[in-house]
Image (spheres, rainbow, N blue to C red):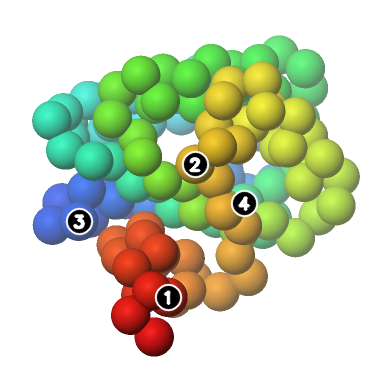
Amino acid sequence: MYRIDLDKEHAIIDLVLDGLIRQDEMSRFVEELKAATLGFAGREVKIKADMRTFRPSSPQVAEMLRAVQEFGLHNGVKRVAEMVESQLAVLQLNRVARESGTDKILRRFTDDAAARRWLIHGDEEQLSA
């Protein structure tokens, strides 16, 4: 299962990937995510990805994830905050992020509020402390 919500004020795409995602479901997710990304054209897009209950997927699903991450990088995505709990999912997501180039703009969080703060304010909050 997946869910995509939009924060239009801050250009944040808030998504949840839950459980084992099949290829047909990932195809729908990718199309919705691309449309959401393009809907923020001209802005610095941020993604908050809650993948705490995501289970490692087939190589085909992982490749679709890699391709949509690459699409995001070419279409304005500047920060990605991920929340992941499964170590197996972390391994797969690390590889996908490295292959897409998303690893350069990715941070992992355990807390929703901290992830959102970083997406909105970046590192400036730490600099002013």
10 Å crowding of disc 2: few (<14), some (14-19), many (20+): some
Label 4 SS: strand
Q: Tell whether label 2 touches label 3 (CB within 8 Å).
A: no
Q: Earlier in the sequence, mark 1 or mark 3?
A: 3
Q: Nearer the viewer, mark 2 or mark 4?
A: 2
Give the vertical position of 5 relative to 45 (above or below): below
Q: Earlier in the sequence, mark 2 or mark 4?
A: 4
**Residue type, label 1:** Gln
Q: Earlier in the sequence, mark 1 or mark 2?
A: 2
Instruction: Quadrant for residue 73, please give it.
Output: top left
At a point 54% along the width and 32% down the height, the residue shown is: 102
Give the vertical position of 38 relative to 105 (above or below): above
Label 3 SS: loop
At a point 82% along the width and 40% down the height, the residue shown is: 91
Q: Nearer the viewer, mark 1 or mark 2?
A: 1
- Out of 123 and 95, give the one closest to the viewer: 123
Q: Nearer the viewer, mark 1 or mark 3?
A: 1
Quarter in which the N terminus is drawn: top right
Badge 1 is on which residue? Answer: 126
Q: Nearer the viewer, mark 1 or mark 4?
A: 1
Is 114 on the left-hand or right-hand side of 85? Answer: left
How many labels, in total? Answer: 4
| Label drawn at residue 51 | 4
Badge 3 is on which residue? Answer: 10
- Residue 7 spot, x, y in % from top left: 22, 55
Q: Tell whether label 2 touches label 1 (CB within 8 Å).
A: no
- Out of 54 and 78, give the one closest to the viewer: 78
Q: How far apart, in angstroms, are the residues tagged by discs 1 and 3?
A: 19 Å
Badge 2 is on which residue? Answer: 105
Q: How far apart, in angstroms, are the residues tagged by discs 2 and 4?
A: 17 Å
Q: Tell whether label 4 touches label 2 (CB within 8 Å).
A: no
10 Å crowding of disc 3: few (<14), some (14-19), many (20+): some
